[in-house]
Image (cartoon, rainbow, N blue to C red):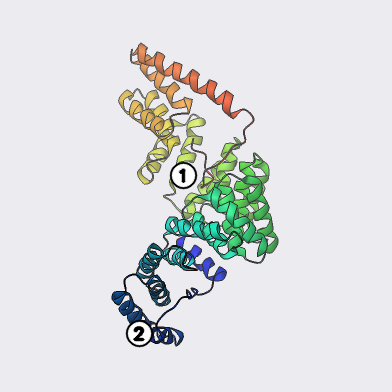
Amino acid sequence: MKHRILQVAALVCSAFAVVQGQTPSEALALQQQGKWPEAAQAWKAITERDPNDAAAFASLGVVLAKQEKYPEAAAAYRQALKLNPKLPGVEMNLGLAEFKQGHFSSAAAALRHVLAADSQNTQARTLLGMSYYGAKKFDLASEYLEPAAKADPANAELHQMLAQSCLWAKKFDCAREEFRHMLEQNPESAPTHVLMGEALDGLGRTPEAIAEFQAAEKTSPNEPNLHFGLGYLYWKSQQYEQAKSEFEQELALDPNHAQSLAYLGDIEWKNDHPDAAQPLLERALKTKKDLRIVYVDLGGIYLQQKRYKDAESALQQAIVLEPTKPDAHYQLAQLYRLTGRKAEAGKELEKVRELRQKADQTDAGKPYAPDSNGVENK
């Protein structure tokens, strides 16, 4: 993702601006001739003679940045700002140097200062949004990227960045509008259909989400994770036969696709086929250790087999991954009851009651919201 952010940045900003200030003519002449190594040596000599020359440090940062020596450039800019915090252009150049290194949080800190001084600086605003995107602060990213995207309707990468920020910040209306715009530009884009599907699912419009995934499947049937995503939507809608078919198609492309194995195992378990479910779930667990659905289902299977120690371990792990879901607590209560641990069983049942009551109070009417992979953390 970092590489793509930097590519978009190249479309947004030009080369670093030269910070204005009184500098020795020799160094400035070398700089104007594009003799960057010679200019850097000249500016270094000047800063060594006068360690309090803020403008010289700023100019040293510029010529170092021209050579793509961004860590050294950032250090020079910071020294310039330490000596003179109001030196024009240095904060912007520092933000650019940090951004070019992929230090998105540091870049954002500098760019916030630029905007505080000049709220109309569109370059700083766009780069700040992209920095937040790189730092995975998607709510803030969407806030700053939205005006930039509106001002540049032809910039597909910028619109995609905004759309994904909205999706992962759970601003589903914003995401849907952006993906609609992107599909108008390229109706055959399978990834965009998939992301539109995730946005629609986040709005609780799962049938429309399924239609978007189906459209993606027609144009790019071998797209990684596509069959899993569609299968998940069928699974969520309790259309288990259709879901099973999609998971099997994903596994035909990737035999070790952990999530497809997990949800296919869950379908077998729901269909009362524990012998078929268990090997699928255990295969998923070998590939990916944090799939809660695997631990819940294996806990149930082991409980049925009277492998109480294994069942307890699996259910406890499910609770660690998601302590607010009542199903693992309920199964654990049954295990404790079967093994004569009545007090512990009572505590788990009380926990089930509390969690269900809390869910009724907080989630009534609330649409389903997927994580950034579009998968419910069951």
Give the mark nearer the N terminus: 2 vs 1.
2
Q: Which tag is nearer the camera, tag 2 or tag 1?
A: 2
Q: Residue at x 36, y 17 (%)?
A: 336
Q: Amino acid at mark 2?
A: Glu
Which residue is more in the foreground, 277 or 9? 9
Location of mark 1 (residue): 259
Q: Residue at x 65, y 55 (%)?
A: 178
Circle 2: element type: helix
Residue 38 tag number: 2
Estimate the x, y position of residue 57 in percent, counting from the top left.
38, 72
Foreground pick, 28 / 194? 28
Rendering coords of residue 69 (x, y %): 37, 72
Seen as rendered, the residue at the extreme right is 184
Residue 2 versus residue 246 in the image, above or below: below
The residue lying toward the viewer, choosing from 371 and 49, is 49
Report whether 29 appears left or right of 175. left
Picture mark count: 2
Q: CA distance from mark 2 to mark 1?
A: 56 Å
Neighbourhood count class around disc 1 (C-alpha, 10 Å): few under 14, some 14–19, many 20 upward: many
Q: Quadrant of residue 97?
A: bottom left
270 vs 217, left or right, is: left
Q: Quadrant of residue 302?
A: top left
In the rendered view, does 79 fall on the left or right side of 330? Answer: left
Name of the residue lying farthest toward the left: 48
Q: Where residue 335 appears, x then y in whole percent? A: 38, 19
Residue 186 in view, yes or no: no
SS under mark 1:
helix
Q: Say left or right for 240 vs 27.
A: right
Q: Position of residue 128 (x, y in %)?
A: 52, 58
